[in-house]
Protein backbone atom coordinates (compact mmCIF):
# COMPACT_ATOMS: atom_id res chain seq x y z
CA UNK A 1 0.00 0.00 0.00
CA UNK A 2 1.47 3.33 -1.05
CA UNK A 3 1.04 5.85 1.74
CA UNK A 4 0.82 9.65 1.63
CA UNK A 5 -0.08 9.57 -2.05
CA UNK A 6 -3.09 10.16 -4.29
CA UNK A 7 -3.52 10.24 -8.08
CA UNK A 8 -4.75 13.16 -10.14
CA UNK A 9 -8.09 12.04 -11.54
CA UNK A 10 -8.18 11.12 -15.22
CA UNK A 11 -11.61 12.23 -16.41
CA UNK A 12 -12.28 10.32 -19.63
CA UNK A 13 -16.05 10.91 -19.71
CA UNK A 14 -18.21 13.80 -20.89
CA UNK A 15 -20.36 13.96 -17.77
CA UNK A 16 -19.54 16.07 -14.73
CA UNK A 17 -17.19 14.71 -12.09
CA UNK A 18 -19.08 13.19 -9.16
CA UNK A 19 -17.55 12.85 -5.72
CA UNK A 20 -17.79 9.06 -5.35
CA UNK A 21 -16.12 8.41 -8.68
CA UNK A 22 -13.55 11.10 -7.92
CA UNK A 23 -12.34 9.48 -4.69
CA UNK A 24 -12.21 5.99 -6.22
CA UNK A 25 -10.19 7.24 -9.19
CA UNK A 26 -7.83 9.30 -7.03
CA UNK A 27 -7.08 6.52 -4.56
CA UNK A 28 -6.85 3.61 -7.00
CA UNK A 29 -5.37 5.42 -10.00
CA UNK A 30 -8.13 4.24 -12.33
CA UNK A 31 -9.95 6.45 -14.81
CA UNK A 32 -13.39 7.86 -14.08
CA UNK A 33 -14.97 5.45 -16.57
CA UNK A 34 -13.24 2.51 -14.87
CA UNK A 35 -14.48 3.73 -11.49
CA UNK A 36 -18.01 3.96 -12.92
CA UNK A 37 -17.74 0.40 -14.26
CA UNK A 38 -16.71 -0.76 -10.78
CA UNK A 39 -19.81 0.88 -9.29
CA UNK A 40 -22.00 -0.75 -11.96
CA UNK A 41 -20.44 -4.10 -11.11
CA UNK A 42 -21.34 -3.56 -7.44
CA UNK A 43 -24.91 -2.54 -8.27
CA UNK A 44 -25.83 -4.97 -11.03
CA UNK A 45 -23.04 -7.51 -11.48
CA UNK A 46 -21.88 -8.32 -15.01
CA UNK A 47 -25.53 -8.58 -16.11
CA UNK A 48 -25.63 -4.82 -16.76
CA UNK A 49 -23.96 -5.62 -20.10
CA UNK A 50 -27.33 -7.11 -21.10
CA UNK A 51 -29.04 -3.74 -20.64
CA UNK A 52 -29.91 -1.78 -23.76
CA UNK A 53 -28.16 1.24 -22.25
CA UNK A 54 -25.23 1.99 -19.97
CA UNK A 55 -26.61 2.79 -16.50
CA UNK A 56 -25.47 6.25 -15.42
CA UNK A 57 -23.44 6.60 -12.24
CA UNK A 58 -23.89 9.81 -10.30
CA UNK A 59 -24.46 9.58 -6.58
CA UNK A 60 -23.02 6.54 -4.84
CA UNK A 61 -23.41 5.20 -1.33
CA UNK A 62 -20.68 4.59 1.22
CA UNK A 63 -21.16 0.85 0.80
CA UNK A 64 -20.77 1.11 -2.98
CA UNK A 65 -17.55 3.12 -2.61
CA UNK A 66 -16.13 0.49 -0.26
CA UNK A 67 -17.08 -2.41 -2.54
CA UNK A 68 -15.89 -0.67 -5.71
CA UNK A 69 -12.51 0.04 -4.12
CA UNK A 70 -12.30 -3.63 -3.15
CA UNK A 71 -12.91 -4.59 -6.80
CA UNK A 72 -9.96 -2.45 -7.89
CA UNK A 73 -7.74 -3.86 -5.14
CA UNK A 74 -8.14 -1.65 -2.04
CA UNK A 75 -9.59 -2.99 1.21
CA UNK A 76 -10.64 -1.06 4.29
CA UNK A 77 -13.40 -0.43 6.81
CA UNK A 78 -15.63 2.52 7.59
CA UNK A 79 -15.62 3.99 11.07
CA UNK A 80 -17.87 6.68 12.48
CA UNK A 81 -16.09 9.77 13.80
CA UNK A 82 -17.32 10.86 17.25
CA UNK A 83 -18.64 14.41 17.69
CA UNK A 84 -18.53 15.10 13.93
CA UNK A 85 -15.50 17.44 13.90
CA UNK A 86 -14.84 19.87 11.09
CA UNK A 87 -12.65 18.63 8.27
CA UNK A 88 -9.86 20.94 9.44
CA UNK A 89 -10.02 19.57 13.00
CA UNK A 90 -10.16 15.99 11.76
CA UNK A 91 -7.14 16.42 9.49
CA UNK A 92 -5.10 18.01 12.26
CA UNK A 93 -6.06 15.35 14.79
CA UNK A 94 -5.42 12.21 12.75
CA UNK A 95 -3.36 9.46 14.33
CA UNK A 96 -2.13 6.00 13.38
CA UNK A 97 -3.06 4.61 9.99
CA UNK A 98 -5.49 7.43 9.23
CA UNK A 99 -2.59 9.86 9.21
CA UNK A 100 -0.65 8.06 6.47
CA UNK A 101 -2.91 5.65 4.57
CA UNK A 102 -5.39 6.64 1.86
CA UNK A 103 -8.83 7.37 3.27
CA UNK A 104 -12.27 8.30 2.01
CA UNK A 105 -13.69 10.98 4.28
CA UNK A 106 -17.46 11.41 4.23
CA UNK A 107 -18.41 15.04 4.80
CA UNK A 108 -21.86 16.51 5.30
CA UNK A 109 -22.15 17.22 1.56
CA UNK A 110 -19.75 14.91 -0.30
CA UNK A 111 -16.81 12.52 -0.03
CA UNK A 112 -13.15 13.45 -0.35
CA UNK A 113 -9.90 11.49 -0.63
CA UNK A 114 -7.08 12.11 1.83
CA UNK A 115 -3.68 10.46 2.22
CA UNK A 116 -1.03 11.95 4.46
CA UNK A 117 -0.72 15.61 3.56
CA UNK A 118 -2.51 15.46 0.20
CA UNK A 119 -6.17 15.85 -0.68
CA UNK A 120 -8.45 15.39 -3.70
CA UNK A 121 -12.13 16.05 -4.34
CA UNK A 122 -14.53 17.43 -6.93
CA UNK A 123 -13.90 21.01 -5.84
CA UNK A 124 -10.21 20.66 -6.67
CA UNK A 125 -11.32 19.36 -10.06
CA UNK A 126 -9.83 15.96 -9.33
CA UNK A 127 -6.37 17.50 -8.91
CA UNK A 128 -4.34 16.49 -5.87
CA UNK A 129 -3.65 19.46 -3.58
CA UNK A 130 -2.09 20.05 -0.18
CA UNK A 131 -4.53 19.52 2.69
CA UNK A 132 -4.00 23.14 3.72
CA UNK A 133 -5.43 24.20 0.35
CA UNK A 134 -8.49 21.96 0.58
CA UNK A 135 -11.88 23.62 0.24
CA UNK A 136 -14.70 22.91 2.66
CA UNK A 137 -12.49 22.66 5.74
CA UNK A 138 -15.39 23.78 7.93
CA UNK A 139 -17.67 20.97 6.78
CA UNK A 140 -18.40 18.20 9.27
CA UNK A 141 -16.87 14.73 9.08
CA UNK A 142 -19.30 11.85 9.59
CA UNK A 143 -17.23 8.75 8.92
CA UNK A 144 -13.97 7.62 7.38
CA UNK A 145 -13.04 4.63 5.22
CA UNK A 146 -9.44 3.72 6.06
CA UNK A 147 -7.78 1.63 3.34
CA UNK A 148 -4.99 -0.51 4.74
CA UNK A 149 -4.66 -3.55 2.48
CA UNK A 150 -4.01 -4.26 -1.20
CA UNK A 151 -5.44 -7.33 -2.93
CA UNK A 152 -5.51 -8.52 -6.53
CA UNK A 153 -8.06 -6.52 -8.57
CA UNK A 154 -11.17 -8.37 -9.71
CA UNK A 155 -12.51 -8.66 -13.24
CA UNK A 156 -14.90 -5.79 -13.95
CA UNK A 157 -17.42 -5.86 -16.77
CA UNK A 158 -17.04 -3.02 -19.26
CA UNK A 159 -18.42 -1.92 -22.59
CA UNK A 160 -15.05 -0.64 -23.78
CA UNK A 161 -14.39 -2.27 -27.16
CA UNK A 162 -11.55 -4.75 -27.27
CA UNK A 163 -8.63 -3.27 -29.21
CA UNK A 164 -7.00 -5.22 -32.00
CA UNK A 165 -3.70 -6.76 -31.05
CA UNK A 166 -0.63 -7.02 -33.23
CA UNK A 167 -1.29 -9.53 -35.98
CA UNK A 168 -5.03 -9.55 -35.39
CA UNK A 169 -7.64 -8.51 -37.91
CA UNK A 170 -11.38 -8.80 -38.16
CA UNK A 171 -11.16 -12.40 -39.30
CA UNK A 172 -8.88 -13.36 -36.40
CA UNK A 173 -11.24 -11.84 -33.84
CA UNK A 174 -14.22 -13.61 -35.42
CA UNK A 175 -12.36 -16.93 -35.33
CA UNK A 176 -11.36 -16.32 -31.70
CA UNK A 177 -15.02 -15.86 -30.80
CA UNK A 178 -15.94 -19.04 -32.67
CA UNK A 179 -13.15 -20.94 -30.94
CA UNK A 180 -14.28 -19.81 -27.49
CA UNK A 181 -17.86 -20.80 -28.31
CA UNK A 182 -16.73 -24.22 -29.52
CA UNK A 183 -14.48 -24.80 -26.51
CA UNK A 184 -16.99 -23.69 -23.88
CA UNK A 185 -20.41 -24.30 -25.42
CA UNK A 186 -21.25 -20.64 -24.82
CA UNK A 187 -24.00 -18.98 -26.81
CA UNK A 188 -22.59 -15.45 -26.56
CA UNK A 189 -19.08 -14.06 -26.20
CA UNK A 190 -17.96 -10.64 -25.02
CA UNK A 191 -14.34 -9.58 -25.42
CA UNK A 192 -12.99 -6.62 -23.46
CA UNK A 193 -9.41 -5.31 -23.56
CA UNK A 194 -8.44 -7.63 -20.71
CA UNK A 195 -11.22 -10.15 -20.03
CA UNK A 196 -13.54 -12.64 -21.70
CA UNK A 197 -17.18 -12.98 -20.61
CA UNK A 198 -19.54 -15.72 -21.79
CA UNK A 199 -23.20 -16.69 -21.54
CA UNK A 200 -24.16 -20.36 -21.54
CA UNK A 201 -27.29 -21.94 -23.08
CA UNK A 202 -29.23 -21.99 -19.81
CA UNK A 203 -27.75 -18.83 -18.29
CA UNK A 204 -29.35 -15.41 -18.08
CA UNK A 205 -26.33 -13.14 -17.67
CA UNK A 206 -22.65 -12.75 -18.38
CA UNK A 207 -20.06 -14.82 -16.54
CA UNK A 208 -16.32 -14.19 -16.41
CA UNK A 209 -14.37 -16.86 -18.29
CA UNK A 210 -10.87 -15.55 -17.68
CA UNK A 211 -8.20 -13.06 -18.63
CA UNK A 212 -8.16 -12.52 -22.38
CA UNK A 213 -4.44 -13.19 -22.75
CA UNK A 214 -4.79 -16.46 -20.84
CA UNK A 215 -7.78 -17.61 -22.91
CA UNK A 216 -5.97 -16.82 -26.16
CA UNK A 217 -2.84 -18.65 -24.98
CA UNK A 218 -4.85 -21.74 -24.07
CA UNK A 219 -6.32 -21.88 -27.57
CA UNK A 220 -3.07 -21.04 -29.36
CA UNK A 221 -0.87 -23.38 -27.30
CA UNK A 222 -2.96 -26.36 -26.09
CA UNK A 223 -1.65 -28.14 -23.00
CA UNK A 224 -3.12 -31.04 -20.99
CA UNK A 225 -3.62 -28.86 -17.90
CA UNK A 226 -5.37 -26.00 -19.73
CA UNK A 227 -8.95 -25.16 -18.85
CA UNK A 228 -9.72 -25.06 -22.58
CA UNK A 229 -8.54 -28.13 -24.48
CA UNK A 230 -8.02 -26.31 -27.78
CA UNK A 231 -8.87 -29.45 -29.76
CA UNK A 232 -11.88 -28.21 -31.73
CA UNK A 233 -11.88 -27.35 -35.40
CA UNK A 234 -12.64 -23.72 -34.56
CA UNK A 235 -9.59 -23.57 -32.29
CA UNK A 236 -7.43 -25.04 -35.06
CA UNK A 237 -8.75 -22.42 -37.50
CA UNK A 238 -7.84 -19.64 -35.06
CA UNK A 239 -4.33 -21.05 -34.62
CA UNK A 240 -3.89 -21.21 -38.38
CA UNK A 241 -4.87 -17.59 -38.99
CA UNK A 242 -2.57 -16.49 -36.15
CA UNK A 243 0.36 -18.44 -37.60
CA UNK A 244 0.55 -21.23 -35.01
Image (tube, rainbow, N blue to C red):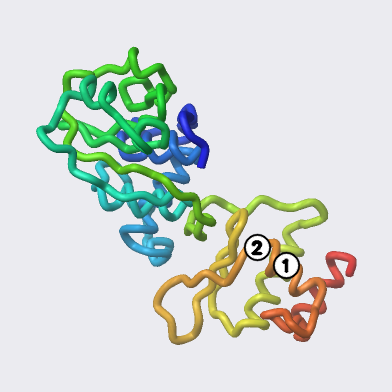
Q: Which residue is mark 2?
A: 212
Residue at far front of view: 96
Q: On screen, 95 above or below 62?
A: above
SS at circle 2: helix
Rendered location of residue 149, percent (x, y):
45, 49
Q: How many marks?
A: 2
SS at circle 1: helix
Q: Evaluate if marks 2 and 1 touch, with contact meaning CB atoms under 8 Å apart.
A: yes
Q: On screen, 97 above or below 174?
A: above
Q: Quadrant of residue 181?
A: bottom right
Residue at far left of view: 83
Q: Is residue 78 left or right of residue 159?
A: left
Q: Quadrant of the C terminus?
A: bottom right
At x 18% / y 38%, what residue is drawn?
81
Q: Is residue 43 left or right of residue 100?
A: left
Q: Residues within 10 Å of mark 2 (few under 14, many from 20)?
A: some
Q: On screen, 232 above or below 53?
A: below
Q: Which residue is mark 1?
A: 216
Rendered location of residue 92, percent (x, y):
27, 21
At x 49% / y 85%, what residue is drawn?
201
Q: CA distance from mark 2 to mark 1?
A: 6 Å
At x 42% / y 73%, what residue is drawn?
205
196 and 90: which one is in front?
Answer: 90
Q: Quadrant of residue 177?
A: bottom right
Rendered location of residue 162, percent (x, y):
62, 54
Q: Is residue 191 left or right of residue 100?
A: right
Residue at far top of view: 133
At x 25% / y 42%, what residue is drawn?
59
Amino acid sequence: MKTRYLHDVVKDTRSRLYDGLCVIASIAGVTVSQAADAIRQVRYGARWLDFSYTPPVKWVSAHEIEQALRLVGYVGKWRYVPDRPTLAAYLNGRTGMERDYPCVVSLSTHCVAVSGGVFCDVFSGGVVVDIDDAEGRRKRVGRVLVLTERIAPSAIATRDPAPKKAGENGKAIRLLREAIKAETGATRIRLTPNEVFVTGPAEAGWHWLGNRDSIEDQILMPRPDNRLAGNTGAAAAYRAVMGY
